[in-house]
Image (spheres, coloured by chain):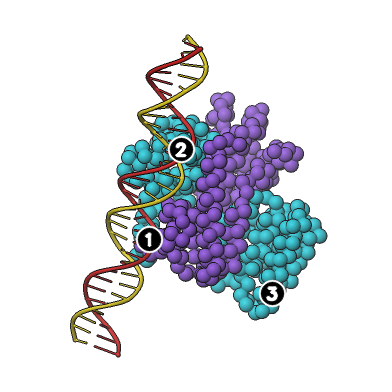
Chain colours: A cyan, B purple, C yellow, D red
Amino acid sequence: MKIEALTKTDNIALRNDIISKIRDHINYKNLEPGEKLPSERMLSEKFGVSRSTIREAIQTLEFYGLLESIPQSGTFVAQLGVTALNGMITEILSLEEPDFKSLVETRILLELKTVRLAAQRRTEEQLIHLKQALDAYTEKVLLGEDAVQEDLLFHLAIAKASGNSSLNTLMLIITPEIITNFEKYHVCDDDQTFVGIEEHKAIYEAIKDREVQKSKELMKVHFKNLYKYCYNVDL
Amino acid sequence: MKIEALTKTDNIALRNDIISKIRDHINYKNLEPGEKLPSERMLSEKFGVSRSTIREAIQTLEFYGLLESIPQSGTFVAQLGVTALNGMITEILSLEEPDFKSLVETRILLELKTVRLAAQRRTEEQLIHLKQALDAYTEKVLLGEDAVQEDLLFHLAIAKASGNSSLNTLMLIITPEIITNFEKYHVCDDDQTFVGIEEHKAIYEAIKDREVQKSKELMKVHFKNLYKYCYNVDL
DNA sequence: TTAACCAATCTGGTAAACCAGTTTAATTTC
DNA sequence: GAAATTAAACTGGTTTACCAGATTGGTTAA
């Protein structure tokens, strides 16, 4: 482990500590949904840390939808009861860094859904966007260059065309981690790239023709290698 | 629209503006993966805002795994090329607030997967946790009290038992929003709660007995009403 | 008694100053 | 001339101070 990783870890540990203290406070005061948390200054003094640290912790809980800060007014607990809030925060604190296998498993699940939805719901505008992404990918491959990024953007375009903003968000969250790990472990085998063009093209055509089931099957084939990798290799 | 929402919107708009400016800078300087961003002070001066604002924008991009800040060293772009980074940031900036239908659709997808994985992989310890969550839910319902929170915690326990940390994280992200909307639109019909006990119990038993297919079918039934709601009602 | 009003206070957001490691480059030493 | 050294500049993180809008509680007018 690198030296500077320690201080970074310390920062996260500190923030998690503050989050658990906020949870304890909510429990102790039995704060109901919509009730107001003490001001950042109060919490800062109470927990013996600076406002920045408090704000960081609040921002994290805000991201998970458990708190909401209103400017010049206060920070409020979401429309969740104490029990749920308690359980959720405990879970958040115990979250592990996702392993590669989990990421791939999740990506496959999400993409088999987004491609079906895209085939059902894509608009003409989204179709054009898909075509552009496909062309950019094809061109890069034909030039013999690395096309991992264009590959990724095509898949994100499918997610967008699914018309499901929630799925789209989740794809955006897990994609960078996937790519980072891909680069790290050199998963992508360049021999497959020309096959990749055909597969991408076929998926695009299926979405264009609104062939729902076929699009899913094509995506399944496209993920075949990933599948194999996911279930045969342990990282 | 409420008045205070304007200032809140302004804050988000400001942060998004900074994010897009960071993107532009990365493009302009053609920063490769792992390269260092200008210091927060430089960016602060360059963009005419305070460091706090810069830090907030960086923190957001860090959450999506696009940047990484190292204490006393600098902020670095992730192992993603300029093209991917560019596309991702653009997507992030255009993210909409998820609609209820998207959330429900996504939740069903995720839960049909987590329950299958839980039936395959659950440990004895996770099984105990599931049982506790089930009992808490049952008790609350039998007392005639509202058990939405305990319901939620049971489902989160399943996600945890799936052994897929990535899926677990995604469930944690969308669950609060779901609950908030449930409360808002009064989706949960209290007549169903006693049926709910039986359904939860059956799912628990299926996971306990490692009956993968059955667990999925039971979850599908459990979501039947949600399904109907999702595809018949527009919000 | 009640409703309108106004100023003191409190809020989250922003900016500026400070801290302790890290990095860098000039200086010294061999 | 090259390698070791050291001090100055730079880094993200933290603390403190300030801002403008929101809240609140007492006062005043009806």
Residue situated in front as seen by the camera: B78 or B48: B48
The number of numbered badges drawn on the structure is: 3
Residue B53 appears left or right of B187: left
x 59%, y 60%: residue = B88
Q: Mark 2 lies on which chain?
A: A
Q: Which amino acid does label 2 sit on?
A: Gln
x 61%, y 33%: residue = B184
Estimate the x, y position of residue C7 in percent, counting from the top left.
38, 27
Tell me the element at label 3.
helix
The residue that disc 1 covers is: B71
Tell me the element at label 2.
loop
Q: Which amino acid does label 1 sit on?
A: Pro
Q: In which quarter of the image is the N terminus of chain B?
A: top right
Q: Are marks 2 and 3 in contact (CB under 8 Å)?
A: no
Where residue B219 sits, quadrant-wise, is top right
The residues tagged by marks 1 and 3 sit, at their Cα atoms, a distance apart of 40 Å
Q: What residue type is labelled 3?
A: Glu
The residue that disc 3 covers is: A139
